[in-house]
Image: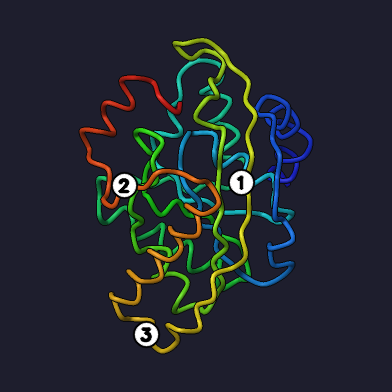
Amino acid sequence: MFYWFFKFVGLGPIAWWYLGLRWRGREHLPRSGPFILAANHIAFVDPVGISMGVPRKVIFVAKTKYYSGRGIGGRALAWFLKAIGQVPIDPASATAANPAMETSRRVLAEGGVVAIFPEGTRSPDGRLYRGRTGVARLALPAGVPIVPVGVTGTREVRLPGSRSGARRGRVTITYGPPVDLTPWRGREEDPQAWREVTDLVMDRIAEITGQDRADRYSTSQEQAQRDIDGVAG
């Protein structure tokens, strides 16, 4: 109940106005059955736009720090993210990530929708970084489609209470055609298949967003500098 209220009645309309949300490619979203949304990650507000464009409940797995926002905007965002079904995890703990995978598998098994940021964290500089293979590890055994999602415009958004002052956005969320996983059928437990599928998903995201590529994972130092600079917050 709270999910639908916040999404369409409570904070949803405010988020739509403040972010200047537009959606493209919603005809590519399966009308029924489980599927995975795999998106690039630029800013804290990315989950809001992605979720609001989908006419079904979307479950995210989010870092615990997303729930510790400062200022009016940060606290409102944390409240909204909880309301729209995010599952907090601590990425520094390997054991903490297991419940996230288990929760995602359960949601898919029940016919639900899971959203994942394969990069694992926000881009430190706006480029698209290498994806981690969790998206493939979920999709292949479950036999569910992966819908690539491209988010643009959130890097320029500043929430009320941020150091640089509030700034509204013009955010576009684009849902691409589902990735055909047929070539990897029978290789559900093959790490090489996980990597191939993940790389293909990232290629599709790059085609949508036009981002420059970084063929590596972002470093903890880059992520720390991003947070100091206040970029994409």
Q: Residues within 10 Å of mark 2 (few under 14, many from 20)?
A: few
As drawn, 181 above or below 36: below
Q: Which residue is mark 1?
A: 50
| Image coordinates for residue 231, horizontal then vertical, percent | 40, 24
Q: Which residue is mark 3?
A: 187
* Colour convention: rainbow
Q: Identify the image quadrant of the C terminus.
A: top left
Mark found first going from the N terminus, 1 or 3 = 1
| Image coordinates for residue 166, horizontal then vertical, percent | 57, 13
Q: Amino acid at mark 3?
A: Arg
Q: Which residue is mark 2?
A: 214
Q: Amino acid at mark 2?
A: Ala
The one nearer the camera, 209 or 193, is 209
* 209 on left or right of 9: left
Q: CA distance from mark 3 to mark 2?
A: 27 Å
Mark found first going from the N terminus, 1 or 2 = 1
Task: Residue at 50% x, 83% y: name it.
Answer: 182
Task: Residue at 33% x, 45% y: name it.
Answer: 90
Helix, strand or loop at label 1? It is helix
| Image coordinates for residue 215, horizontal then vertical, percent | 29, 52
Q: Residues within 10 Å of mark 1 (few under 14, many from 20)?
A: many
Q: Are marks 1 and 2 in contact (CB under 8 Å)?
A: no
Q: Amino acid at mark 1?
A: Ile
As drawn, 114 above or below 75: below
